[in-house]
Image: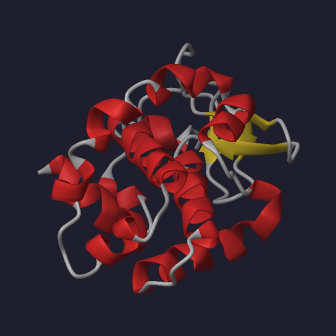
């Protein structure tokens, strides 16, 4: 059986400006799935291949790692960052994200559009304390992770549980 691109097989959209081919170009250094050129690329700073499914995971885990208040959701997301190799993957600002992933710069313009709705989306006992404990830059990064998931149509079941909890209000 020939190897196939995991994101292609799960109908995940490609990185902005690229096309999916189905033919694996590399294995994700984070999750290990095979990804084609449209669904993965060599990460600039860490010099490792990374799939598009892991990009929003890295962003959300980075937010949790720098959160001032430790909530249950922050702790669950921080564990993900530890599993990624900690600080080598850390993203601290939207500008840092764009420098690392310039192909996603267009999506960053959408943050302001959904920022107004975020407090209304995060009203549960688990999501509200986490979101409200974040400063504006961290909130913007978290919303960026959500936007990537939504724009690439990453299926919820491909995401770790804490990120499923955060994306759920946006998919209802």
Q: Position of residue 134 (x, y in %)?
A: 46, 64
Q: Quadrant of residue 5?
A: top right
Q: Position of residue 24 (x, y in %)?
A: 66, 34
* Residue 99 drawn above or below residue 93: above
Image check: 62 left or right of 137?
right
* Residue 82 drawn above or below residue 2: below
Q: Quadrant of residue 93?
A: top right
Observer able to see residue 3:
no
Image check: 12 left or right of 103?
left
* Residue 63 drawn above or below residue 78: above
126 and 103: which is toward the camera: 126
Image coloring type: secondary structure
Q: Residue furthest left?
A: 172
Count the labels in the image.
Answer: 0
Q: Is the N terminus in the top left, top right, bottom left or bottom right quadrant?
A: top right
Q: Residue at x 52, y 83 (%)?
A: 75
Q: Position of residue 84 (x, y in %)?
A: 71, 66
Q: Position of residue 104 (x, y in %)?
A: 56, 26
Q: Quadrant of residue 166?
A: bottom left
Q: Residue at x 39, y 35 (%)?
A: 111
Q: Residue at x 52, y 59 (%)?
A: 60
Observer able to see residue 124:
yes
Q: Residue at x 63, y 71 (%)?
A: 65
């Amino acid at each position: 059986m020939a190897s196939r691109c995991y994101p292609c097989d799960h109908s995940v959209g490609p990185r902005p400006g690229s096309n999916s081919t189905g033919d694996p170009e590399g294995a994700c250094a984070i999750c290990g799935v095979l990804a084609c050129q449209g669904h993965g690329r060599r990460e600039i700073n860490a010099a490792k291949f990374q799939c598009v499914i892991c990009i929003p995971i890295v962003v959300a885990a980075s937010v949790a790692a720098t959160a001032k208040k430790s909530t249950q959701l922050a702790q669950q997301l921080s564990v993900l960052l530890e599993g990624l190799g900690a600080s080598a993957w850390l993203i601290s600002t939207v500008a840092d994200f764009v420098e690392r992933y310039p192909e996603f710069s267009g999506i960053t313009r959408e943050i302001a559009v959904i920022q107004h709705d975020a407090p209304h989306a995060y009203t549960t006992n688990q999501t509200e304390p986490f979101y409200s404990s974040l400063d504006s830059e961290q909130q913007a990064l978290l919303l960026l992770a959500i936007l990537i998931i939504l724009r690439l149509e990453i299926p919820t079941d491909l995401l770790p549980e804490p990120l499923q909890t955060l994306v759920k209000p946006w998919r209802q």
